[in-house]
Image: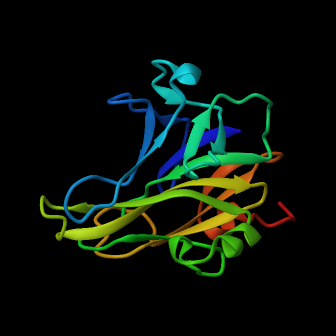
Amino acid sequence: MKSFTVDTCDRVRDGIALKHDPYPHIPVGGTGPGRRGKWIPAGRDDFGETERLDRCHNIVTKGKGTTLIVRENRRDDRHALVLVKIRGGNRGSAYLRTEDGHILHQVEDSVRRAYGIQLLEYGHDSEGADGRSGGPHHQALLVLDEGACVQVERLGRLLDDGPTKCWIRWMPDRAGLRVGSLSDIFPDPAD
């Protein structure tokens, strides 16, 4: 499956950055006070010293239930691996929700699956050395099925020109991964 990073409400970047210290992994969230960070391991033999992950496959180990990112063995463009890390406003936060408003990390897996969303890992970052100046800025590593849509709600004092809400939608046959306003994601069929 293809992989993408969404870090603002108006830009999608191809690929996901890999960190290599102490082992190849995708970081989700932050480390330190007021933060919740997780590292999703990537197969050392599969990716070596690669800096960016463009295509991959995820597996869940049977023993511990750990998610592992490995090299793609068959091309699958019906799904997309997406790292969402959009920040909220100053002294605010950013929440990831289903199309109708369920907060992703607070609902059962069966509810997320009904929307075509698989939450591989969830974390959050915050502001300030003590982690209490703002946040949490929720981050998630997701697998989106074709047509799946995730809503991002940004709260707090927005110092940039970004919107308070944006949507992320995976449409492999049309435009790929799209991010933007509701009218950008669901264009008028007459156009």
- Left or right of 177? Residue 73 is right
User: As displayed, is residue 150 above or below residue 44?
Assistant: below
Residue most extreme to the front? 63
Residue most extreme to the right? 190
- Left or right of 136? Residue 12 is right
How does the figure colour the protein chain or chains? Answer: rainbow
Locate residue 85, reporting x and y percent.
44, 55
Q: Is residue 116 visible?
A: yes
Locate residue 22, reporting x and y percent.
33, 30
Locate residue 179, reporting x and y percent.
59, 56
> In which image quadrant can residue 37 be found?
bottom left
Report the quarter where the N terminus lies.
top right
Front residue (pair 66, 142): 66
| Residue at point 45%, 25% (across, down) | 51
Front residue (pair 47, 61): 61
Front residue (pair 86, 19): 19
User: As displayed, is residue 48 above or below residue 190?
Assistant: above
User: As displayed, is residue 74 above or below residue 147?
Assistant: above
Front residue (pair 58, 172): 58
| Residue at point 68%, 62% (across, down) | 117
